[in-house]
Amino acid sequence: MNFRFAWLALLATSSLGQAQQGTPPSTAPGAAKRTAPAGAFEVNGLAAIVNGRVITKNKVGFMLSPIFAQLAAQFPRRGPEFERQVLEAREKILQELIDREIIISEFKALEKKGANLPDHVVDKEIARQIRSNYNGDETRFQEELKRARMTRDGYRKMTREQLIVQAMRAEHFSDAPPPLPGEIAGEYAEMKDKLRDTTKDKITFHKIFLPRQDSQNPLATPESQLALAEQLATDIKNGSDITELAKKHSRDAFAEEGGFQQDLPRTDLATEFASIIFAGKDGDVLGPLEDPAGFTVVKITRISPGPAPALSEVREMVEERVRTKKSSTAYEKWMASKRRSAVIQRKL
């Protein structure tokens, strides 16, 4: 078998370890330091056992953390839809980890025959994840590891396993029909936004920030502030001027300017807020978004995305993605047979 683990890993785009949390500047939406959400998942214990290998709730929780943070910001009142999306995300993560362990079992046998994933490939992928998921901030990455009770070695192992899975999939289904020029162009158009240098993203917007406790209104409560934020968001969507509303209601350093901020770098925003806001489009009204300090309503004026790489720079990656899509049906059948023969004990 021709093992292409090194270059496949270098081309892979991993969804692993996207924990996104930190202490952004006080001028940004979601600027207060966010503590780990309580009740999202149990940190210790077993999530599943696959062929004798343990998947911990800690690992599931670490991967769920950024999704939970974003959903918590989007759903200040929580509710059934919030719970549904959290549980759906947890189930998807657990199934991904179960499938990963099944494939790792196969790779263990191949290691005895010389299969290997070079250390420098794992190092490069971790560096990419820190750049992409933590805005290049090593300190924020270390803080998230600490909150998740995970060591750097543990994270490295998790990343290595994800890359092995991607390489094994490509190796087993390398006979997929070669990508056609139109397929390559279409796939590049679909994925180039995700490949851009997000650390160069900028955004111009107006915002209103309402603290949970308002020193200018002793009668205000978190509940009344949330209700006010919801009403302001509705008013703005119905045509009210956010500039005037921000001057009247906002309680941050930009209130006098009508909450206007121009070309704010993505790296100045709390990562879960950035994920929500940069997924919007010019003219969108978003919120209220919640963090421990209060509630934020945003009206986007302009999003200036960071540069995307040219097709020539990522052609191999794009071609591999096309091959993966073409082989997806065969891959799912293969995985279904592997699941049937594996010994799986689910604890969640």
Image (cartoon, rainbow, N blue to C red):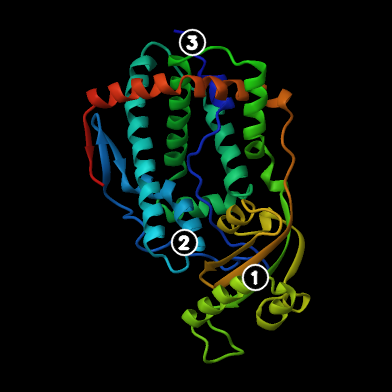
Residue 342 lies in quadrant: top left
Instruction: Choose the circle earlier in sequence order: 3 or 1.
Output: 3
Q: Distance between the residues labelled 3 and 1?
A: 55 Å
Task: Classify 10 Å Cα crowding around label 2: few (below 14), some (14-19), many (20 and above).
Answer: many
Closer to the camera: disc 3 or disc 1?
1
Name the amino acid type tagged 1: Asn
Label 1: element kind: loop
Q: Name the residue under label 2.
A: 72
Q: Do the residues labelled 2 and 3 touch (CB within 8 Å)?
A: no
Residue at left 50%, top 20%?
326
Q: How far apart are marks 1 and 2 (CA)?
A: 25 Å
- Residue 299 or residue 128, whichever sits in front: 299
Label 3: element kind: loop
Closer to the camera: disc 1 or disc 2?
1
Please determine whether, in this image, residue 249 is positioned above or below residue 52: below
Q: Are marks 1 and 2 in contact (CB under 8 Å)?
A: no
Q: Which mark is residue 238?
A: 1
Task: Classify 10 Å Cα crowding around label 3: few (below 14), some (14-19), many (20 and above).
Answer: few
Q: Distance between the residues labelled 2 and 3?
A: 43 Å
Q: Residue 50, how many percent across, how many down? A: 26, 32
Instruction: Choose the circle earlier in sequence order: 2 or 3.
Output: 2
**In the image: residue 301, left or right of residue 346:** right
Please determine whether, in this image, residue 261 is positioned above or below residue 62: below
Name the amino acid type tagged 3: Asp
Q: Mark 3 points at which residue?
A: 175
Residue 318 lies in quadrant: top right
- Residue 289 or residue 216, whichever sits in front: 289
Residue at left 35%, top 31%?
99
Name the amino acid type tagged 2: Ala
